């Protein structure tokens, strides 16, 4: 599904990723493991088209992503859950969840929202609340629901368990593990394998912007 070859990414004049190779297959759960500052978030943002590649290639379903805008990647079934959630605090939970569907001009918004609520029923219970009224763990669930609105084929989850209370971390792990039955491919980043080890099919390790098979 996703093939990355010799990818270099810089932020300003600083090189962050160097020669990254990665393959994610259909229905495959892939872990990207590394300490803070290793380049995990930079790679996720590059895959979503938020950061440009300096060199190398990325292919999605065999087609080049070099000139594919972020909203077109979302329209093609890619969803992104950033580490810091990036919810809009003054919008309701449901409005936050719907943002990627609006941006991608989806035509099946109601059906997709219903399915997302089935996958994460907790989010539906506080759908009318403002995002700023939620706890950090609840915001993570909302961010995951938002990613699922567009992520019907490939889901990018950046540190989903970071800063979450143990009870909610276990619930997040349950939801993410259950996504395999949805036919999704997932890239999940963590600083270690404490939450995701049992659900991963393949592990890559990243250190100082260099990725190797784990």
Image (cartoon, rainbow, N blue to C red):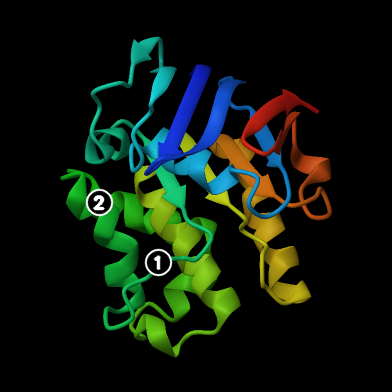
Measure how far apart labels 1 and 2 are at the Cα level: 16 Å
Badge 1: how crowded within 10 Å, few (<14), some, or many (20+)?
A: few
Left or right of 159 in this view: 155? left
- Chain-order first, disc 1 or disc 2: 1
> In which quadrant of the rendered view does residue 201 lie?
top right
The answer to whether residue 116 is visible is: yes
On the image, the x and y values in percent for residue 125 come to 46, 79
The residue lying toward the viewer, choosing from 202 and 4, is 4
> Is 94 placed left or right of 23 in the picture?
left
Point 75% across, 65% down: residue: 170
Going by the image, does 105 lie left or right of 186?
left
Q: Quadrant of residue 194?
A: bottom right
Q: How many marks?
A: 2
**Circles 1 and 2: CB atoms closer than 8 Å:** no
Name the spot of residue 131 as percent of width and height, x first. 38, 80
Q: Secondary structure at mark 1?
A: loop
Say if residue 152 shows up in the picture: no
204 shown above or below 189? above
74 over 130 or under it: above or below: above
Q: Using the image, determine if residue 144 lies above or below residue 20.
A: below
Residue that sits furthest to the top in the current view: 62
Indicate whether 92 appears above or below 19.
below
Front tag of 1 and 2: 1
Q: Residue at x 44, y 48 (%)?
A: 80
Q: Residue at x 23, y 23 (%)?
A: 67
Place of residue 76 in the rendered image (x, y in percent of width and height, measured from the top left): 31, 30
The 10 Å Cα crowd at callout 2, few under 14, some 14 to 19, many 20 or more, is many
State the residue position of label 2.
101
The label number, if any, that marks residue 86 in the structure image: 1
The residue sitting at the bottom extreme is 133
Task: Locate residue 172, reporting x and y percent.
Answer: 65, 61
């Amino acid at each position: 599904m996703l093939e990355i070859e010799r990818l270099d990414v810089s932020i300003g004049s600083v090189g962050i990723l160097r020669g990254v190779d990665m393959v994610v297959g259909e229905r495959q759960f892939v872990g990207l493991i590394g300490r803070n500052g290793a380049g995990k978030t930079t790679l996720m943002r590059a895959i979503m088209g938020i950061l440009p590649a300096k060199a190398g290639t990325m292919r999605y379903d065999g087609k080049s992503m070099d000139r594919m805008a972020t909203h077109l990647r979302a329209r093609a079934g890619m969803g992104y859950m950033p580490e810091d959630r990036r919810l809009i605090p003054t919008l309701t939970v449901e409005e936050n969840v719907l943002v990627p569907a609006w941006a991608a001009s989806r035509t099946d918004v109601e059906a997709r929202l219903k399915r997302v609520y089935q996958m994460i029923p907790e989010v539906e219970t506080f759908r009318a609340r403002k995002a700023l009224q939620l706890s950090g763990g609840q915001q993570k669930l909302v961010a995951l629901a938002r990613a699922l609105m567009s992520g019907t084929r490939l889901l990018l989850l950046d540190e989903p368990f970071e800063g979450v209370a143990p009870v909610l971390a276990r619930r997040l792990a349950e939801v993410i593990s259950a996504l395999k039955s949805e036919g999704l491919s997932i890239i999940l980043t963590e600083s270690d394998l404490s939450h995701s080890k049992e659900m991963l099919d393949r592990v890559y390790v990243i250190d100082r912007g260099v990725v190797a098979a784990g």
